[in-house]
Image (spheres, helix red, strand yellow):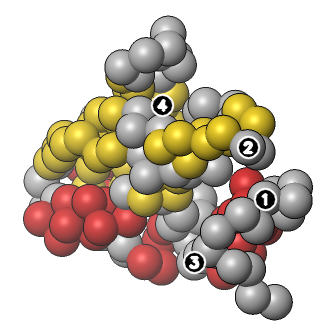
C-alpha cells in the first residue's frame, strides 16, 4: 500500500499503523538478558515539557533481565502519532555500564504530528527529557548477598 504524502487523511489513522508496527517490534525484541547480559537493571524516567498545553505527567519504568529490550515509547499526547526511541541512548549507556552503575540524561523532541482533526494537523514538538540509570548485574548480586 502506498500513501500519498499529501492528504492521505481519510482516517487511514497513521497512529494505528504506527501502533501495529510498535507491537510487532515489541514482539520481535529480545530479552534484556540476551541483548545486555551484564545489565541487572535499567531504570527509565521520562518527563515531558509542552510549549502550549499542560505537560503530560512523567513516566518511569524499571526493566529487569527478563523484560523485553524495547525502548520506544508512545508520545503521551492523545492525538499525537509520535514516539520516542531511546534505543540508541540505552545501547550507549549499556556499553559503559557493564561494570559499574551509570546514568545518562538527554532531551529528545517528539517528531510526531498532532491530529486534532484531519484537516488541521501540526507538529507535536513535545520535549521529552529522559533519564536512564543502569545497574550492572554484579552490583545486584552483591546487593542480594549482603
Ligand atoms: Zn508527540
Q: Earlier in the sequence, mark 1 or mark 3?
A: 1
The residue labelled by disc 3 is: 30
Residues under labels 2 and 4: Cα distance? 34 Å
Residue at image position (43%, 59%) is 85
Which corner quadrant of the image does residue 1 belong to? bottom right
Q: Are marks 1 and 3 in contact (CB under 8 Å)?
A: no
Residues under labels 3 and 4: Cα distance? 21 Å
Q: Are marks 1 and 2 in contact (CB under 8 Å)?
A: yes
Residues under labels 3 and 2: Cα distance? 39 Å
The residue labelled by disc 1 is: 9
Residues under labels 1 and 3: Cα distance? 34 Å
Whole-percent x, y for residue 124 in the image: 48, 39
Q: Which mark is residue 119?
A: 2
Q: Is residue 71 visible?
A: yes
What is the secondary structure assignment of the residue under circle 3?
Answer: loop
- Does residue 45 sit above or below 28 in this rendering? above
Which numbered mark, 1 or 3, is in the foreground of this view?
Answer: 1
- Nearest the camera: 30 or 64? 30
Residue at image position (51%, 66%) is 69
Number of residue marks = 4
- Does residue 93 sit above or below 118 in this rendering? below
Amino acid at each position: 500500500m502506498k500513501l500519498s504524502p499529501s492528504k492521505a487523511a481519510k482516517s487511514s489513522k497513521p497512529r494505528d499503523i504506527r501502533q501495529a508496527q510498535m507491537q510487532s517490534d515489541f514482539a520481535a525484541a529480545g530479552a534484556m538478558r540476551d541483548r545486555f547480559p551484564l545489565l541487572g537493571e535499567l531504570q527509565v524516567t521520562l518527563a515531558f515539557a509542552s510549549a502550549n498545553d499542560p505537560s503530560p505527567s512523567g513516566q518511569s519504568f524499571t526493566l529487569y533481565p527478563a523484560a523485553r529490550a524495547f525502548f520506544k515509547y508512545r508520545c503521551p499526547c492523545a492525538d499525537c502519532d509520535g514516539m520516542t526511541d531511546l534505543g540508541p541512548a540505552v545501547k550507549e549507556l549499556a556499553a559503559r555500564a557493564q561494570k559499574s552503575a551509570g546514568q545518562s540524561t538527554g532531551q529528545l523532541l517528539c517528531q510526531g504530528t498532532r491530529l486534532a482533526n484531519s484537516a488541521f494537523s501540526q507538529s507535536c514538538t513535545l520535549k521529552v527529557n529522559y533519564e536512564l540509570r543502569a545497574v550492572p548485574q554484579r552490583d545486584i548480586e552483591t546487593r542480594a548477598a549482603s
